[in-house]
Image: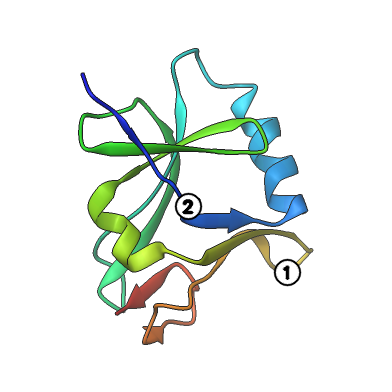
Amino acid sequence: MHMETFTQIPVSFTASAIAEIKRLYQQQPANRYLRVGAKGGGCSGLTYVLDFDERKEQDETFDIAGIPCVMEKSHGLYLMGMEIDWDNGLSNRGFTFSNPNASKTCGCGTSFAV
């Protein structure tokens, strides 16, 4: 199976996001990658995907601070340049997505339109 690697890393992670992802990654079974992507749905049309998954044929791979990541080639168009952060506040805890390609986002911060 031929896998391509991004020549430019499509997304970036803040230090707090990397720390949280590394913590979660240690709990995953072997052969898992951090999947970054988008899927249809959500209040603005597309929803972000950030999960651990197996690598698929249409994926390109990249590495963030030693964490193996995968993303479908077609998603780079929507997500290139996005920054992912981890917010550990009392009222707002979770990953946040700052996407320069989004023309519209919603209040939940996990949905966007291009």
Q: Residues within 10 Å of mark 2 (few under 14, many from 20)?
A: few
Residue with the mark numbered 1: 91
Q: Disc 2 marks which amino acid?
A: Gln
Q: Is residue 20 left or right of residue 36?
A: right
Depth order, front residue of 20/75: 75
Q: Residues within 10 Å of mark 1 (few under 14, many from 20)?
A: few
Q: Is residue 108 left or right of residue 86?
A: left
Q: Position of residue 47 (x, y in %)?
A: 34, 63
For the residues bearing labels 2 and 1, Cβ distance under 8 angstroms: no
Helix, strand or loop status at disc 1: loop
Q: Position of residue 79 (x, y in %)?
A: 40, 63
Front disc: 2 or 1: 2
Q: Position of residue 12 (x, y in %)?
A: 59, 56
The disc, 2 or 1, on the residue closer to the chain's N-terminal end is: 2
Depth order, front residue of 112/99: 99
Q: Disc 1 marks which amino acid?
A: Ser
Residue 46 lies, with reference to residue 69, above or below; the image says below
Helix, strand or loop status at disc 2: loop
Q: Residue furthest bottom?
A: 103
Image quadrant in which you'd find residue 57: top left
Residue with the mark numbered 2: 8
Residue drawn at point x = 24 percent, y = 65 percent = 41
Residue 78 lies, with reference to residue 107, above or below; the image says above
Residue drawn at point x = 49 percent, y = 12 percent = 30
Say which quadrant the C terminus sits in.
bottom left
Residue drawn at point x = 21 percent, y = 18 percent = 1
Depth order, front residue of 93/34: 34
Depth order, front residue of 28/37: 37
Q: Residue furthest top?
A: 30
Q: Is residue 90 left or right of residue 70?
A: right
